[in-house]
């Protein structure tokens, strides 16, 4: 019984290099993360910082003590 590769090596959709079986269909974990981040950036947005209030804080007043 001879086993031949059923699937031909795919190309990394990120950098077009030969994909690695471990990271298929990408060539490396880096490309995999990059691709993931791309669609994450398009669909899901990270929660931004809360809107800061625009009121000014009065400077602390120092007591002159016995002047
Ligand atoms: Zn790649």
Image (cartoon, grey):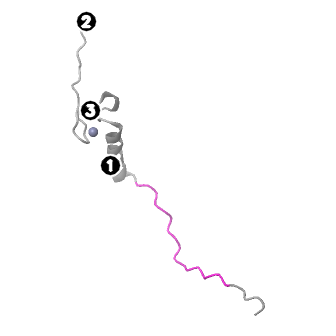
At 31% from the left and 41% from the top, the residue drawn is 31
What segment carries the magenta color? Answer: 45-61
Is ligand 1 less than 8 Å from the beta carbon at label 3? yes
Q: Quadrant of the C terminus?
A: bottom right
In the image, is residue 16 above or below residue 44? above
Q: Quadrant of ligand 1?
A: top left
Q: Which mark is residue 5?
A: none
Q: Which mark is residue 1?
A: 2
> In what element is the residue under mark 1?
helix
**Distance Cα–Cα, label 1 vs label 2:** 43 Å
In the image, is residue 45 above or below residue 61? above
Q: Estimate the x, y position of residue 42 in percent, counting from the top left.
A: 33, 52
Residue 21 occupies quadrant: top left
In this figure, which residue is indicated by the disc labeled 3?
A: 19
At 51% from the left and 64% from the top, the residue drawn is 50
At 23% from the left and 32% from the top, the residue drawn is 18
Is ligand 1 less than 8 Å from the beta carbon at label 2? no
Bin the neighbour count of mark 3 within 10 Å (Cα to Cα): few under 14, some 14-19, many 20 and up. Answer: many
């Amino acid at each position: 019984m001879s086993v031949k590769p059923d699937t031909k090596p795919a190309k990394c959709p990120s950098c077009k290099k030969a994909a690695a079986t471990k990271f298929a269909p990408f060539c490396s974990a880096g490309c995999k993360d990059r691709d993931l981040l791309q669609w994450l950036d398009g669909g899901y947005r990270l929660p931004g910082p809360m809107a800061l209030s625009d009121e000014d804080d009065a400077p602390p007043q120092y007591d002159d003590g016995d002047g």
